[in-house]
Amino acid sequence: MRLYLDDEHSTGYDVVPGIEEAVALHGFRPAKISVHSANSSARDKILAGIDKICRMLAKNMEGIGRFI
């Protein structure tokens, strides 16, 4: 499954904070996220959020490794 984000209807970056919260608080593992946007500012914000999500996922996986 993939999640495609754009900013055409102000939805691309609106979704990223919710995913960040779900990963941080509930251990959510999102589908692959792809960004397609002509708006370079929105694209940069979305990509920064995705980078943060990836860092949180990596940190979560480190914690799991201690219990396996």
Image (cartoon, rainbow, N blue to C red):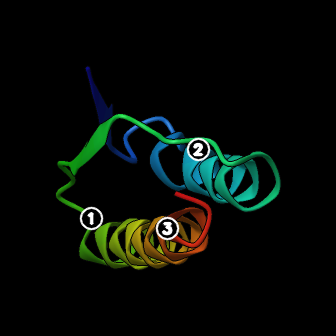
* Callout 1: SS: loop
Whole-percent x, y for residue 49 in the image:
49, 71
Q: Quadrant of the N terminus?
A: top left
Label 1, label 3: how far apart the Cα atoms are? 39 Å
Quickly name the residue at label 3.
65
In the image, what residue occupies the spot 59% across and 44% down?
Answer: 15
Question: Which amino acid, mark 2?
Answer: Val
Whole-percent x, y for residue 11 in the image:
53, 39
Pointers 2 and 3 in contact (CB under 8 A)? no
Of tags 2 and 3, the one toward the viewer is: 3
Of callouts 2 and 1, the N-terminal one:
2
Quickly name the residue at label 1.
39
Return the residue nearer the eye: 55 or 46: 55
In the image, what residue occupies the spot 62% across and 62% down?
Answer: 67
Direction from residue 26 to residue 3 in the image, left or right = left
Q: Residue furthest front?
A: 68
* Callout 2: SS: helix
> Residue 55, relative to residue 53: is it above or below?
below
In the image, what residue occupies the spot 49% across and 67% down?
Answer: 65
Crowding around mark 3 (Cα neighbors within 10 Å: few <14, some 14 to 19, many 20+) is few
Question: Which amino acid, mark 1?
Answer: Asn
Whole-percent x, y for residue 45 in the image:
44, 75
Label 2, label 1: how far apart the Cα atoms are? 16 Å
Quickly name the residue at label 2.
15
Give the quadrant of residue 17: bottom right
Question: Which amino acid, mark 3?
Answer: Gly
